[in-house]
Amino acid sequence: MGDNELGAFLRSRREAVAPADVGLPGGSRRRTPGLRRAELATLAGISVEYLTRLEQGRDRRPSAEILAALADALNLSADERVHLHRLVKVVTGGVCQGGGPPARTVRPTVRALLDRLEPAPALVVDRLSELLAFTAGYDRLAGPAGLLEARPPNLTRFVFTDARARAVFPDWERIADERAAELRAAAALGDPHATALAEELAVTAGLRFSGRFEASAALPGRTGVERWTHPLAGELLLAYESLELPDTDEQRLIVYLPADDATSAALDLLTRPGPLTTLAG
């Protein structure tokens, strides 16, 4: 990870915007993915020179008005706008994740919420992707796949260092991109524990992690669909929602739901109380 997280984030978002989405012609002769700098500068009402300085890290203190104009021009989500603001605050000394490790406790009301969500697979993770609490339904989904064997279980470590991860996640490349992006987002805000985990994975997982980490300046999605190959239930198509919990330690609640009828039937059998047996035909 470089020392110009603000510039890297702006550039990644600019390259992700299709010209047609902002009323500009596309065409096959474009050499730059997404928007050109001149196009974004025009949309945001700033000079190309100033945008270049921001992306290259030669100016790291844009005003709130400039940030708002860029966020509007890039059509940033609410999460991305918050992240953009925090990146500037890190540079100006206004925010830092601090030196303390993420809390490993979950509020009693959150645990009560997990109880209410049974038998749906649901879990609470911290900003390092460590599992803090989960439903029995998630235990039956993730346990046989090996995700819960480490102490503490960590989603990012599993994806990059456990040989079973590629079998569990047929779309491993996309899942790996998202896990690397999640960790970089925490490290970019000055979290020393996220940085330490990234350094660990750069050694233990090598280029398959470090290449993604260096390239992943954007935020991962908070909702989507994952394909799992479960050792007992077979192929599963799971939609997920990821919700920020209202506390200062950036814990998230993730809930999985069946995305098709076959997965719904398989989850009903998999999460039913009783001994686990092979369900796949």
Image: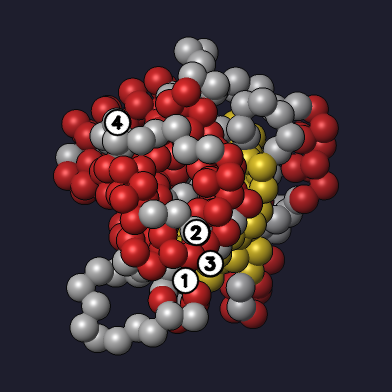
Q: Real-space Cα distance between discs 3 and 1? A: 13 Å
Q: Real-space Cα distance between discs 1 and 2? A: 45 Å
- Tell me which amino acid carries mark 4: Asp
Q: Real-space Cα distance between discs 4 and 2? A: 25 Å
Q: Are marks 1 and 2 in contact (CB under 8 Å)?
A: no
What x and y, as percent, mark residue 159? 35, 47
Q: Real-space Cα distance between discs 2 and 3? A: 33 Å
SS type, badge 2: helix
Color encoding of the figure: secondary structure
Report the residue marked by disc 1. Answer: 235
* Callout 1 crowding tier (Cα within 10 Å): few <14, some 14–19, many ≥20: some
Q: Choose top left, top right, bottom left or bottom right for residue 184.
A: top left
Numbered badge on residue 44: 2
- In this rendering, position of residue 176 left or right of residue 85: left
- Tell me which amino acid carries mark 1: Glu
- Number of labels in the image equals 4
SS type, badge 4: loop
Q: Is residue 30 above or below residue 125?
A: below
Numbered badge on residue 225: 3
Q: Choose top left, top right, bottom left or bottom right for residue 4.
A: top left
User: Relative to the observer, which residue lies in front, 237 or 267?
Assistant: 237
SS type, badge 3: strand
Report the residue marked by disc 4. Answer: 3
Q: Residue at x 51, y 42 (%)?
A: 84
